Amino acid sequence: MKVQLDRDRCQGHGRCYVLASSVFESDDDGYGLVVSDSVPVELHEPARKGAGNCPEDAITIIED
Ligand code: SF4
């Protein structure tokens, strides 16, 4: 699995990195970042949870 975060869409709500802190993190201004483009299998569920809860639909999950 890979995760992409569209920084143009992100409004910094922070839900991704609050719900899935192993997959997403915050930059200095509260906008989301992806910890690692490639997500190990044990983090697939939190990655999907973070993506599904982004109010701006800024996170794309790419299944292998
Ligand atoms: S939940 Fe969406 S809008 Fe909020 S920080 Fe994460 S990517 Fe950005």
Image (cartoon, rainbow, N blue to C red):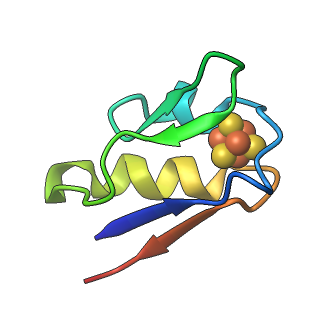
Q: Nearer the viewer, residue 5 or 45?
A: 5
Q: Quadrant of residue 58?
A: bottom right
Percent position of residue 36, x then y: 30, 48
Location of residue 31 by image quarter: top right
Asked if 14 appears above or below 62 in the picture, the reply is: above
View extreme (top): residue: 28
Residue visible at 25% across and 83% down in the picture: 64
Say whether residue 22 is left or right of residue 13.
left
Which residue is at a point 36% across and 39% down the rendered structure image?
35
Q: Residue at x 53, y 31 (%)?
A: 17
Going by the picture, which residue comes out furthest to the left? 41
11 up-or-down from 18: above or below: below
Q: Left or right? Give the position of 31 relative to 27.
A: right
Residue 27, position as x, y percentages in the image: 58, 24
Q: Residue at x 71, y 19 (%)?
A: 29
Where in the image, quadrant-wise, is ligand 1 located? top right
